[in-house]
Amino acid sequence: MDGRLAIDTGVLVLYFVIIISIGLYMGRKEENLADFALGGRRIPWWAVLASIIAAETSAGTFFGTPGEGFALRNYTYLQLAIGTILARILVSYIFIKPYYDYKVYSIYEYLTARFGVPTKNAASAVFMITRLLASGARLYVAAIALALAYEMISGSRPGQIYTTLGGIKAVIWTDFIQASIMIGSALVALGLLYSAIPGGWNEIVARHGGFGISDFLSTGLDPGKNGWEKWKGMFEVEYTIFAGLIGSTFITMATHGTDQDMVQRMLTAPDIRRSRRSLMLSGLADIPIVLTFLSIGLLLWTYYQAHPDPTLPKTPNETFCHFILYEMPVGLRGLLIAGIFATAMGSLSTALNALATSFTRDWYEPYVNRNATSEESLRAVRWATVWFAILMIVVASTTSYLVIVHPNVRIIPIVLGIFGYTYGSLLGVFLCGMFTKRRGNNAGNIIAMIAGFIVVAILSGLPNNIAGLFGTTVYSQPSWLPVMEFPWWICFGTIVTFCTAVLFKTRREHYPPGVA
């Protein structure tokens, strides 16, 4: 090992030692599932805020968002941030209070109280499968750094270690550190990229051809067409102002209101008011974070136009990592790689914690061991963490194979697309429960969730996409029906699921705890 690699490795080893030590320290007084899952509801709001940011800014964001800037060479992806802010306000006042009122560990317990066990089981199963697939895809992105960084920490899985031992407290506090490293390392990368471009801003503008409103704002409307043909194009473009205002709002309502991974950290705050504060402020933080990572991607494109590199990866997701490993100064390179692992661990650790909590609360205690003691539940949740980590590795390996076969695939559409197929069904059922008192029942909810999935599959062209892998098609897409891009999938899945669910009547009028 030469001196330069030793310095970078030293930075990484120090980082991992600190993170694992925090996990062990946080787990020393953990006595039951409540401590593991909710941290005793004693986490300060600003730490919850940092944890939400860390979970959102996954390795997919660290590589995927610069990949979007590099591939598209504009800021239109930023339009989706508008909806994330609107959605957080809605989630704060629709979802958080019922979860606190019902004192849930797994948010799907709310559905048991509102509708019954079958609805809860269906929602919990959808969450676990979808989250496993999405987080496994994100794990593949983190593996890019492992594969390219000279196997500097090959075989290490500290995120699993501190999550298994420390529970949500370890997740929250390590997230706080990881969010700080992530933001700091991204800003360092942005500054170094800018300084490495000869001619600075003038060169950037010249290479890009100038910046206009179209680099930030897109409607997707075709001015050369009229009527429905003009509006249809709006659904066939990934990043538009309409997708930002409507589609992204539904995406964030689903991921921040019905996903155990994200909601669980909000429930660690001492009360509803502080939980809402952390959630809404995280939305405001999204805009500068996304802007920074998109700028990194655009500057990467400019840099490699000025400094052609024949070894540049074909996959846009790997371009930023390539720059870090081969162009960054020693020491800073180690810090940036630590930032990559910080984002990966920040999102994957909470995914593991949420999956294990949901499995233990929704499946182990009701079905596997109905008389489980606190110690047995705690042991079960820790073993579940280990097994979900193994399954994530399997999914990540499959994702890496698909990227090798299709090198132009971008990671952001993959990760958000996975959510798009099923989370509309989740959101629709939750909204039926929270907005009505006598609509929806177990049978109707399951029918509604299936209907929502089928509609999204058709609108996204999923059957033909799968058939295309075998050189055939399932059906001919009608000319009037758009093949919708991923920002719209959850929106239409939610609408179909909600409208179907409310057709069925609840047997009894439901009131929250403490209400007559």
Image (spheres, rainbow, N blue to C red):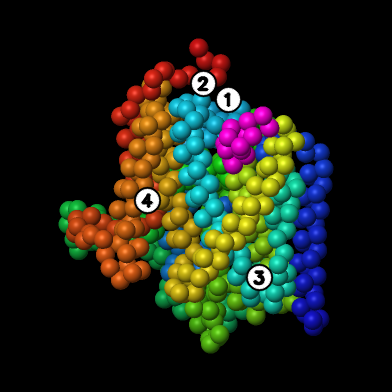
Q: Amino acid at mark 2?
A: Pro
Q: Quadrant of residue 332?
A: bottom right
Q: Are marks 2 and 4 in contact (CB under 8 Å)?
A: no
Residue 60 lies, in percent from the top left, at 55, 61
- Judged by depth in the image, the label closer to the viewer, 4 or 3, is 3
- Can you identify the residue that label 1 sits on? 101
Q: Is residue 236 left or right of residue 9?
A: left
Tell me the distance, in whole angstroms, between the alpha carbons under discs 2 and 3.
Answer: 48 Å
- Can you identify the residue that label 4 sits on? 489
Q: Which residues are magenta?
A: 358-372
Tell me the distance, in whole angstroms, between the alpha carbons under discs 1 and 4.
Answer: 31 Å
Residue at x-position 41% and y-position 44%: 424
Q: Are marks 4 and 3 in contact (CB under 8 Å)?
A: no
- Neighbours of disc 1 within 10 Å: few (<14), some (14-19), many (20+): few
Q: Are marks 2 and 1 in contact (CB under 8 Å)?
A: yes
Residue at x-position 79% and y-position 81%: 1
Q: SS class of the residue under badge 4? A: helix
